[in-house]
Image: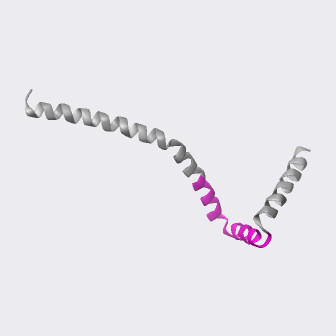
Amino acid sequence: MNHEEALAVRREALVAQSARQRSAVIAGMEPLLRQAAAFDRVVASVRSHPVITGLAVTAVALVGSRKIFDIATRLLTVYMLVRRR
């Protein structure tokens, strides 16, 4: 085997190793990509409704996050009861 053939064999081995590593990295990143996509949907929703977002931020600043959570929980409960009928 001459030098060029040895280099070609070595190159093929490195390309195969690179493909395996790339697949492993992509498989490891899958959960992160799903979370990033969900976050992107939230950001897109916030950007498309700036007035509602501003009102929500103002409400949290004035009332407090714990109180807002309690009110939202109660409203959700009422909504589910009304929707069930």
Q: Per the image, is 57 magenta?
A: yes
Q: Main secondary structure of the magenta part?
A: helix
Outermost residue toward the right?
85
Tell me which residue sits at (85%, 56%) in the image: 75
State left or right for residue 22 relative to residue 2: right
Can you say which quadrant of the picture contains the C terminus?
Answer: top right
Q: Quadrant of residue 42?
A: bottom right
Q: Quadrant of residue 53?
A: bottom right
Q: Per the image, is 53 magenta?
A: yes
Q: Height in image: 52 above or below 22? A: below
Residue 50 image position (x, y, % from top left) = 66, 68
State left or right for residue 67 relative to residue 20: right
Q: Height in image: 54 above or below 35? A: below
Q: Height in image: 45 above or below 57? A: above
Residue 28 image position (x, y, % from top left) = 47, 40
Closer to the camera, 77 or 67? 67
Tell me which residue sits at (77%, 70%) in the image: 59
Residue 58 image position (x, y, % from top left) = 74, 72
Closer to the camera, 39 or 51? 39
Can you say which quadrant of the picture contains the N terminus?
Answer: top left
Q: Which residues are magenta?
A: 39-63
